[in-house]
Amino acid sequence: MTQYILVQRRPANTNSVVVAIAPIGQGDRLFVASHDENVSQWDTSNGLLVNKFTHPDSVGSISITQDSRYMVSTSRYSVYLWGTAVSVTPLFTLTENQAPGHAPPQYTCVSWSPSNKQERIGHLIVEGSACGRIKWTRDQSMVVTRGGIVRLYENNTWRFIRSFSIGRSVNDTTTSSTTPPMIAFATGTTPDYSYSRRDKQDDLQFNIRLFNLDNTQQVAEIKGHDDPSYSISFSPDNKSIAIGGNDGYVIINQI
């Protein structure tokens, strides 16, 4: 079964990119960030909007704590902490004092204690603008996407474990909590950012491919968007996968 949720209507000749997806519970609630400067919460059982978390600028990423009580979101140079149940304003905001045109950005890993809202840990990952999405797997190792290559690192030591190269640019990743774990990619164009537009119904170039995280072998392939996808997430029960495209829709496919 395939379900479609319209997050943002796309005006003519524009994109409505769904940039980040995060499910909670058993996948019955879905948090979605798009280019309309909102994070919206949806009820996946009926496709209805529950509420919105409004930001001052476009949202770059979102993450939900393991107990589903808090959401962390990023927008330009700020990071926001929200309560998932009733927040209409952020509980805490961390802003980087960096103006455009200054030194290259530094990508850091930070950890908060929601109870005292203090930054606890900081690790320098990489300097420059080549680093893409950063995600944590269920065992707390880390995936860093960079162009067409996805690298897996150990969380505490930053030891390199392995990499995936799938021949396309990678916009987002998600990992399952199955044994063995699976990893899936939201993919864009070829690494040189050129691709032929879809011109027939059975074109499979943007299908979602699932790989074994431990040995990099492909294990499945499911239907994706007709164009590049920009965000992706397994449901908590690993039975479905949500995929965000540039058409304002989130597709939820059963695995």
Image: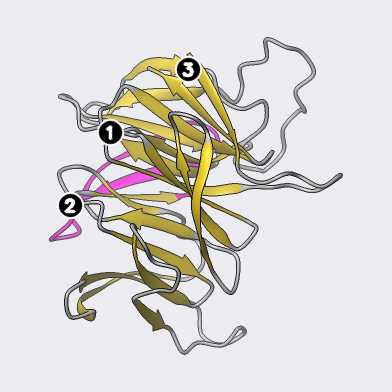
Query: Which numbered disc covers residue 154?
Result: 2
Q: Is residue 165 magenta?
A: yes
Q: Nearer the N terminus, badge 3 or badge 2?
A: 2
Q: Secondary structure at mark 3?
A: strand
Please name whichever residue, 177 or 195, is drawn nearer the observer in this view of the structure: 177
User: CA–CA distance between discs 3 and 2?
Assistant: 29 Å
Q: Magenta residues, as a range?
A: 146-168
Which amino acid, by three-letter code, is at mark 1? Answer: Gln
Question: Which image quadrant for residue 37?
Answer: bottom right
Image quadrant containing the C terminus: top left
Circle 1 — which element?
Answer: loop
| Type of the residue with mark 2 | Glu
Residue 221, image x and y in percent?
45, 16
Vertical side of 62 occupied by 203: above or below: above
Look at 72% across and 44% down and name the residue there.
Answer: 9
Give the CA distance from mark 1 to mark 3.
21 Å
Name the residue that disc number 1 marks: 26
Relative to 120, 254 lies left or right: right
Eye-nearest disc, 1 or 3? 1
Q: CA distance from mark 2 to mark 1?
A: 27 Å
Q: Residues within 10 Å of mark 1 (few under 14, many from 20)?
A: few
**In the image, residue 38 lies at what x, y percent?**
56, 60
Q: Which residue is located at x 40 percent, y 72 percent?
A: 80
State the mark number for residue 197.
none
Mark in the foreground, 2 or 1: 1
- Give the residue type that dot 3 points to: Ile
